[in-house]
Image: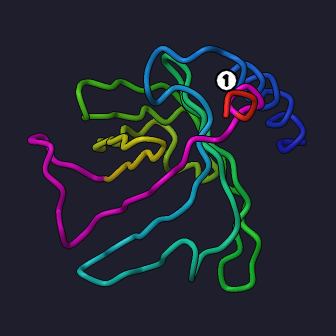
């Protein structure tokens, strides 16, 4: 039932997010292409590698949503979440409204967001000064998902 309800809300958001013209460089749909999670100077997992599958993240003017299906240690894992965000310069803060893991709901995650051509990179956590703990961090990379309009213009 939860999956059906989630899909009922996800599909309109995906359609709206993919069809709107983008005013901000991060708006639109992005395909998850790589990630590295480091804890106490040790790589906990990498994507692709120890974690495989696929995911997509979509931003509108004030909201974000992500959805994916991964394989970790031969176990399928559904991943989804979303909420609101603020972006000031390269400082990006997600306000988690819903998430696969209920412990994330209500949390704020401070990140750095960088866009280079068609690649978006988000790194977190950052402290109040915008600095990353080089011993404990997560870095995720996305590439802009091609729309049928983008393919026609090539």
Of residues 140 and 24, the one drawn nearer to the viewer in this rendering: 24
x 82%, y 29%: residue: 11
- Residue drawn at point x = 86 percent, y = 29 percent: 8
63 vs 8, left or right, is left
- Per the image, the residue denoted by label 1 is 17
Q: Is residue 130 magenta?
A: yes
Q: Position of residue 102 (x, y in %)?
A: 58, 48
Q: Position of residue 61 (x, y in %)?
A: 50, 16
**57 left or right of 70?**
left
Give the percent coordinates (x, y) of residue 129: 9, 41
In-image side of 92 versus 78 (left or right): left
Quadrant in the picture for the N terminus: top right
Image height of 123 relative to 137, above or below: above
In percent of width and height, residue 54 lies at: 69, 60
**Residue 79 falls in image quadrant:** bottom right
SS label for mark 1: helix
Tell which of 116 and 139 is nearer to you. 116
Q: Quadrant of residue 42?
A: bottom left
Q: Residue furthest front?
A: 154
Tell me: 120 left or right of 4. Answer: left
**Who's the residue at 13% across and 40% down the image?**
128
The magenta-colored residue range is: 124-150
The structure residue drawn at horizontal position 49% and vertical position 36%, both measured from the top left corner, is 96
Question: In the rendered view, how is the structure colored?
Answer: rainbow
Label 1 crowding class (10 Å Cα cut-off): few <14, some 14-19, many 20+? many
Q: Nearer the viewer, residue 29 or 109?
A: 29
């Amino acid at each position: 039932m939860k999956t059906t309800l989630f899909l009922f809300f996800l599909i309109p958001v995906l359609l709206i997010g993919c069809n709107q013209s983008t005013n901000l460089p991060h708006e639109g749909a992005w395909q998850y292409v790589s990630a590295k999670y480091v804890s106490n100077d040790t790589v906990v997992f990498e994507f692709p590698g120890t974690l495989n599958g696929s995911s997509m993240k979509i931003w509108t003017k004030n909201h974000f949503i992500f959805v994916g299906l991964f394989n970790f240690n031969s176990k399928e894992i559904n991943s989804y979440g979303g909420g609101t965000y603020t972006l000031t310069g390269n400082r990006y803060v997600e306000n988690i409204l819903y998430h696969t893991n209920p412990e994330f709901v209500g949390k704020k995650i401070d990140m750095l967001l960088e866009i280079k051509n068609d690649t978006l990179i988000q790194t977190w956590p950052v402290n109040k000064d915008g600095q990353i703990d080089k011993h404990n961090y997560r870095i995720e990379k996305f590439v802009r998902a091609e729309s049928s309009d983008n393919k026609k213009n090539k």
